[in-house]
Amino acid sequence: MMDSYDTLIIGAGPAGLTAGIYLSRARQNVLILDSGSGGGQVTLTHAVANYPGTGETFGYKLASEMKKQAVGFGCKVLTNQKIRSMELEADKKIIRTEKGDYSGKTVIIAAGGRPRTLGIDSEKKFQGTGISYCATCDGDFFTDEDIIVVGGGNSALEEAVSLT
């Protein structure tokens, strides 16, 4: 028997969790699926100081609080769910994962993104504590510090300009 929901949300980062909170408060039966441990890119950020209403906090803590709030409003959140296939054409949408199949009337894709990494030794060790992937988000932490911006094209140039 397949578990059935009003809404299936792919992605348990800030966007997916926020959608889940709003839908659950509107009395929708919501399932949020994430291919990893949930939380999205914010979990890669050591300190978050620009999220309204939170003061400075840790990225993983902010993500954990968001998940707790979503679950508190009735969302079911399943992590480590690798999606094998989706059937989105019919009235009943079906998402098949390696661990189970789920159906819903609606699917929201809030899959987020992943930073483009350098793939060098120790990069993972310093993520969020010296290596950042968002100058707009983290630039203030590097005030009066010598920095290096790595990248190509307009994106890297825009990030470098925002730090000057």
Image: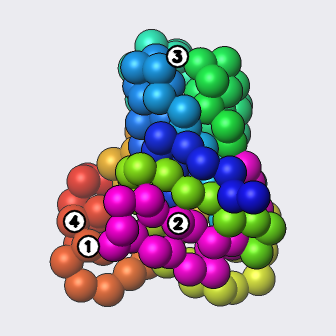
Disc 3 to disc 2: CB gap under 8 Å? no
Q: Which of 108 and 41 lies nearest the eye of the viewer?
A: 108
Vertical relation: 148 (above or below) 77? below
Q: Which of 28 and 35 lies nearest the eye of the viewer?
A: 28
Q: Which residue is mark 1?
A: 155
| Whether residue 60 can be seen here | yes
Q: Is residue 63 magenta?
A: no
Vertical relation: 159 (above or below) 72? below
Where residue 45 appears, x then y in whole percent?
A: 60, 47
Where residue 61 appears, x then y in whole percent?
A: 70, 31
Q: Which residue is mark 3?
A: 55
Magenta stretch? 78-97
Give the CA separation, mark 4 to mark 2: 40 Å
Q: Nearer the viewer, mark 3 or mark 2?
A: 2
| Whether residue 145 can be seen here | no
| Quarter of the view holding residue 41 | bottom right
Residue type of the residue flagged with mark 2: Ile
Where residue 83 appears, x then y in whole percent?
A: 62, 73
Is label 2 in a helix, a strand or a loop?
strand
State which tag comes first along the sequence, 4 or 3.
Answer: 3
Residue type of the residue flagged with mark 3: Gly
Q: Which residue is mark 2?
A: 94
Q: Which residue is mark 4?
A: 158
Give the CA separation, mark 3 to mark 2: 40 Å
